[in-house]
Amino acid sequence: QVQLVEDGGRLVQAGGSLRLSCAASGRTFSSYSMGWFRQAPGKEREFVAAISWGGSGTYYADSVKGRFTISRDNAKNTVYLQMNSLKPEDTAVYYCAASYRSGGYLMSKSVYATWGQGTQVTVSS
């Protein structure tokens, strides 16, 4: 089973950009589909983006489509979330997660068995 560590969260102004990274331990990273979720104070954890194990399939929440891009580098055991045109409503703790599932199932947090500890993203207006 992989262990996940997120990085890259910080305070940024609205309209700015951030790139989050999630480093995975273990030699089986390429076997997992990966997802990014976020949780704002007082709200449930919600899906942001996901990518299949080979990188050919990507999925996005409607709220981030066109602004965020998920990618992965299996040689580096890392998945990324490039976030552009950030808005105050993007403020949340961002988590990466690993799943053996694929396709549309990746939009559900229930299919993810392993989670990172999260990284805080704060977007000021």
Image: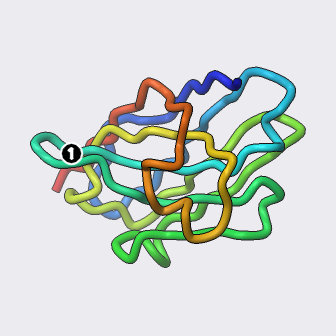
Displayed quadrant of residue 125 = bottom left
Mark 1 closeness class: few <14, some 14–19, many ≥20 residues within 10 Å:
some
Residue at image position (46%, 76%) is 65
Residue at (50, 28) in percent of width and height: 116
Q: Give the amino acid at mark 1.
A: Ala
- Determine whether 119 is above or below 60 in the image: above
| Vertical order, 24 against 75 (above or below) | above
Q: Residue at 21% of width from left, 45% of height from top?
A: 40
The secondary structure type at the circle numbered 1 is: loop
The picture places residue 22, in percent across and down from the top left corner, at 61, 35
Q: Position of residue 86 (x, y in %)?
A: 35, 61
Reading the image, the residue beneath label 1 is: 40
State which quarter of the image contains the N terminus: top right
In the shown orientation, is residue 52 left or right of residue 4? right
Would you say 85 lies left or right of 14 here?
right
The structure residue drawn at horizontal position 34% and vertical position 72%, both measured from the top left corner, is 63
Residue closest to the eye, 36 or 101: 101
